[in-house]
């Protein structure tokens, strides 16, 4: 017989006599079903591991390039496509990138979204073609200032 939870004692760093009622299989399954989509829906670009791919898009296979201008500067280009509408893709990035440290900067071209983070500039070009939306991502890392910014 297990002691009730009120009679639990702590000795050192281990709990002794801990009792917790068993979780029903239904409650466990319901919790798993509710939590799983949050983990399953977020994917990230392989070339830019801290940039999520918008919901409804998939990363385009073998459609990325990386160029290093020097040790501390360069350019990474990646792309994705899918059935999400251009407005939904724009909203996804406008709503989520600030949590990753990106600040929105109005772009010179109306169709691009531009974000800044330190020496990094992220430019998202979103375009509708036929029944799909295409996203081209450019991550530009500027060289460090000689004045040690």
Image (cartoon, helix red, strand yellow):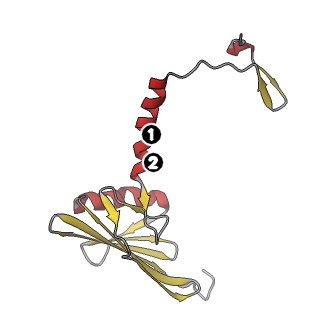
- The residue carrying mark 2 is 39
Marks 2 and 1 sit apart, C-alpha to C-alpha, by: 7 Å
Q: Is residue 51 above or below residue 35?
A: below
Q: Which residue is drawn at 60% across and 18% down?
A: 21
Q: Residue 148 appears at what percent x and percent y?
A: 63, 83
In the rendering, which numbered label is found on residue 96?
A: none
Name the quadrant containing residue 123.
Answer: bottom left
Quadrant the C terminus occupies? bottom right
Q: What element carries label 2?
A: helix
Would you call the spot at circle 2 few (<14 residues within 10 Å), some (14-19), or many (20 or more)? few
Q: Residue at x 79, y 30 (%)?
A: 14
Please state which of residues 107 and 31 is positioned toward the viewer in this rendering. 31
Horizontal side of residue 141 vs 8, given as left or right = left
- The residue carrying mark 1 is 35
Horizontal side of residue 134 vs 54, given as left or right = left
Q: Residue 31 appears at what percent x and percent y?
A: 45, 32
Please state which of residues 89 and 21 is positioned toward the viewer in this rendering. 21
Q: Is residue 20 above or below residue 139?
A: above
Horizontal side of residue 100 vs 88, given as left or right = right
Q: Residue 67 appears at what percent x and percent y?
A: 47, 85
């Amino acid at each position: 017989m297990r002691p009730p939870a009120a009679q639990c004692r702590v000795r050192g760093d281990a709990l002794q006599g801990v009792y917790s009622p068993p979780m029903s299989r239904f409650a466990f399954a319901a919790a798993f079903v509710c939590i799983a989509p949050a983990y399953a829906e977020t994917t990230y670009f392989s070339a830019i591991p801290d940039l999520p791919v918008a919901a409804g898009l998939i990363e385009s296979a073998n459609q990325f390039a990386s160029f290093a201008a020097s040790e501390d500067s360069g350019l990474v280009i990646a792309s994705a496509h899918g059935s999400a509408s251009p407005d939904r893709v724009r909203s996804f990035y406008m709503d989520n990138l600030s949590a990753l440290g990106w600040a929105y900067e109005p772009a010179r071209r109306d169709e691009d979204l531009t974000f800044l983070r330190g020496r990094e500039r992220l430019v998202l070009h979103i375009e509708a073609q036929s029944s799909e939306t295409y996203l081209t991502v450019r991550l530009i890392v500027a060289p460090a200032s000689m004045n040690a910014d």
